[in-house]
Image (cartoon, grey):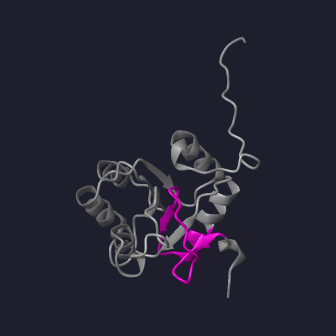
Amino acid sequence: MKDARFEGVRGDQGCPPVCDPSMILIADDNENDSILIVETLKAAGVKNQIMLVVDGKDVIAYLKGEQQYADRATYPQPSILLLDLRMPKIGGFEVLEWLKFAIPTRDILIVIFSGYAELSDIRRGYELGARSFLPKPCRVEDIQNLVRAYSTYWQVDNTTWHPRARQQTGPA
Protein backbone atom coordinates (compact mmCIF):
# COMPACT_ATOMS: atom_id res chain seq x y z
CA MET A 1 0.00 0.00 0.00
CA LYS A 2 1.35 3.40 -1.01
CA ASP A 3 1.49 6.00 1.77
CA ALA A 4 0.65 9.52 0.54
CA ARG A 5 2.98 10.99 3.15
CA PHE A 6 5.88 9.45 1.23
CA GLU A 7 4.87 10.86 -2.16
CA GLY A 8 8.08 11.94 -3.87
CA VAL A 9 10.18 9.84 -1.52
CA ARG A 10 12.11 7.03 -3.08
CA GLY A 11 12.77 3.80 -1.26
CA ASP A 12 13.91 0.33 -2.21
CA GLN A 13 10.83 -0.61 -4.25
CA GLY A 14 11.27 -0.02 -8.01
CA CYS A 15 11.96 3.71 -8.19
CA PRO A 16 12.41 5.53 -11.46
CA PRO A 17 16.03 6.47 -12.13
CA VAL A 18 16.85 10.03 -11.12
CA CYS A 19 20.21 11.77 -11.05
CA ASP A 20 19.85 14.59 -8.57
CA PRO A 21 22.87 16.38 -7.14
CA SER A 22 20.62 17.55 -4.31
CA MET A 23 19.62 14.11 -3.05
CA ILE A 24 18.81 13.75 0.65
CA LEU A 25 19.55 10.41 2.28
CA ILE A 26 17.61 9.90 5.52
CA ALA A 27 18.92 7.17 7.81
CA ASP A 28 16.48 6.32 10.58
CA ASP A 29 15.24 2.98 11.86
CA ASN A 30 11.98 4.41 13.18
CA GLU A 31 9.32 4.69 10.46
CA ASN A 32 7.31 7.27 12.43
CA ASP A 33 10.39 9.47 12.80
CA SER A 34 11.10 9.13 9.07
CA ILE A 35 7.52 10.17 8.27
CA LEU A 36 7.82 13.21 10.55
CA ILE A 37 11.16 14.23 9.02
CA VAL A 38 9.77 13.94 5.47
CA GLU A 39 6.63 15.89 6.41
CA THR A 40 8.72 18.60 8.09
CA LEU A 41 11.00 18.88 5.05
CA LYS A 42 7.97 19.27 2.78
CA ALA A 43 6.33 21.81 5.11
CA ALA A 44 9.58 23.80 5.03
CA GLY A 45 9.36 23.89 1.23
CA VAL A 46 12.26 21.49 0.58
CA LYS A 47 12.03 19.96 -2.90
CA ASN A 48 15.14 17.73 -2.89
CA GLN A 49 14.66 14.08 -3.84
CA ILE A 50 14.65 11.87 -0.74
CA MET A 51 15.87 8.33 -0.18
CA LEU A 52 15.28 6.37 3.02
CA VAL A 53 17.43 3.69 4.64
CA VAL A 54 16.83 2.05 8.01
CA ASP A 55 20.28 1.39 9.47
CA GLY A 56 23.94 2.28 9.29
CA LYS A 57 24.78 -0.79 7.25
CA ASP A 58 22.48 0.47 4.48
CA VAL A 59 23.96 3.99 4.73
CA ILE A 60 27.43 2.62 4.08
CA ALA A 61 26.23 0.33 1.25
CA TYR A 62 24.37 3.29 -0.31
CA LEU A 63 27.36 5.64 -0.10
CA LYS A 64 29.72 2.97 -1.46
CA GLY A 65 27.30 2.16 -4.27
CA GLU A 66 27.14 -1.50 -3.29
CA GLN A 67 24.43 -4.17 -3.26
CA GLN A 68 21.03 -2.82 -4.33
CA TYR A 69 22.52 0.72 -4.46
CA ALA A 70 25.07 -0.04 -7.20
CA ASP A 71 23.10 1.75 -9.94
CA ARG A 72 24.05 5.42 -9.50
CA ALA A 73 21.36 6.51 -11.96
CA THR A 74 18.78 5.12 -9.55
CA TYR A 75 20.69 5.77 -6.32
CA PRO A 76 22.80 8.92 -6.83
CA GLN A 77 25.25 10.10 -4.22
CA PRO A 78 23.46 12.33 -1.73
CA SER A 79 24.54 15.85 -1.00
CA ILE A 80 22.74 15.75 2.37
CA LEU A 81 22.76 12.96 4.97
CA LEU A 82 20.20 13.18 7.79
CA LEU A 83 21.51 10.63 10.26
CA ASP A 84 19.96 9.10 13.34
CA LEU A 85 22.54 8.15 15.96
CA ARG A 86 20.86 5.08 17.43
CA MET A 87 20.11 2.50 14.76
CA PRO A 88 20.41 -1.30 14.63
CA LYS A 89 23.35 -3.15 13.05
CA ILE A 90 25.59 -0.10 12.65
CA GLY A 91 24.78 3.10 14.54
CA GLY A 92 25.18 6.71 13.48
CA PHE A 93 28.52 7.22 15.23
CA GLU A 94 29.97 4.18 13.46
CA VAL A 95 28.73 5.59 10.14
CA LEU A 96 30.41 8.91 10.92
CA GLU A 97 33.65 7.12 11.85
CA TRP A 98 33.55 5.17 8.59
CA LEU A 99 32.80 8.33 6.59
CA LYS A 100 35.65 10.25 8.17
CA PHE A 101 38.23 7.75 6.97
CA ALA A 102 36.63 6.06 3.96
CA ILE A 103 35.38 8.84 1.69
CA PRO A 104 35.77 12.61 1.58
CA THR A 105 32.65 14.15 3.11
CA ARG A 106 33.29 17.85 2.69
CA ASP A 107 30.74 17.85 -0.13
CA ILE A 108 28.11 16.05 1.96
CA LEU A 109 26.11 18.04 4.49
CA ILE A 110 25.81 15.69 7.47
CA VAL A 111 23.07 16.53 9.94
CA ILE A 112 22.49 14.41 13.02
CA PHE A 113 18.87 13.89 14.05
CA SER A 114 18.52 12.40 17.48
CA GLY A 115 16.04 12.13 20.30
CA TYR A 116 18.99 12.14 22.69
CA ALA A 117 20.58 15.58 22.84
CA GLU A 118 23.43 14.87 25.24
CA LEU A 119 26.27 17.36 24.95
CA SER A 120 28.85 14.58 24.63
CA ASP A 121 26.94 13.10 21.65
CA ILE A 122 26.72 16.50 19.97
CA ARG A 123 30.43 17.16 20.50
CA ARG A 124 31.41 13.70 19.22
CA GLY A 125 29.18 14.13 16.14
CA TYR A 126 30.87 17.42 15.25
CA GLU A 127 34.31 15.88 15.78
CA LEU A 128 33.38 13.11 13.34
CA GLY A 129 32.25 15.47 10.59
CA ALA A 130 28.61 16.38 11.25
CA ARG A 131 27.87 20.03 10.52
CA SER A 132 24.63 20.33 12.43
CA PHE A 133 22.61 18.59 15.11
CA LEU A 134 18.83 18.71 15.40
CA PRO A 135 16.75 17.12 18.14
CA LYS A 136 13.82 14.89 17.22
CA PRO A 137 11.17 15.80 16.51
CA CYS A 138 12.49 18.72 14.48
CA ARG A 139 10.39 21.72 13.60
CA VAL A 140 9.85 23.52 10.30
CA GLU A 141 11.89 26.41 11.70
CA ASP A 142 14.82 24.03 12.35
CA ILE A 143 14.82 22.97 8.68
CA GLN A 144 14.48 26.57 7.50
CA ASN A 145 17.49 27.50 9.63
CA LEU A 146 19.47 24.69 7.99
CA VAL A 147 18.40 25.89 4.55
CA ARG A 148 19.59 29.41 5.39
CA ALA A 149 22.89 28.21 6.86
CA TYR A 150 23.70 25.75 4.04
CA SER A 151 21.74 27.18 1.13
CA THR A 152 23.74 25.54 -1.67
CA TYR A 153 22.58 22.05 -0.63
CA TRP A 154 18.85 22.64 -0.74
CA GLN A 155 16.19 22.98 -3.39
CA VAL A 156 13.28 24.94 -1.97
CA ASP A 157 9.90 26.01 -3.22
CA ASN A 158 9.96 29.75 -2.76
CA THR A 159 6.17 29.91 -2.92
CA THR A 160 5.84 27.95 0.34
CA TRP A 161 9.07 28.90 2.08
CA HIS A 162 9.52 32.44 3.32
CA PRO A 163 12.70 33.09 5.26
CA ARG A 164 12.19 35.41 8.16
CA ALA A 165 13.35 38.93 7.60
CA ARG A 166 16.28 39.88 9.75
CA GLN A 167 15.31 42.00 12.67
CA GLN A 168 16.93 45.39 12.93
CA THR A 169 18.32 46.56 16.20
CA GLY A 170 18.02 50.23 16.92
CA PRO A 171 16.38 52.96 14.87
CA ALA A 172 16.10 52.59 11.07
Image coords of residue 65 (percent x, y): 36, 72
Image coords of residue 61 (percent x, y): 35, 74
User: Who is closer to the viewer here, 145 or 45?
Assistant: 45
**Residue ID at (29%, 48%):** 127
**Residue ID at (72%, 46%):** 158
Residue 100 lies in quadrant: bottom left
Residue 91 lies in quadrant: bottom left
Which region is colored magenta? 8-35
- Taken as a whole, is the magenta stretch helix, strand or loop? loop
**Residue ID at (67%, 88%):** 1
Residue 102 lies in quadrant: bottom left
58 in relation to 138, above or below? below
Q: Residue furthest top?
A: 171
User: In the rendered image, which quarter contains the C terminus?
Assistant: top right
Image coords of residue 121 (percent x, y): 35, 55
**Residue ID at (70%, 50%):** 157
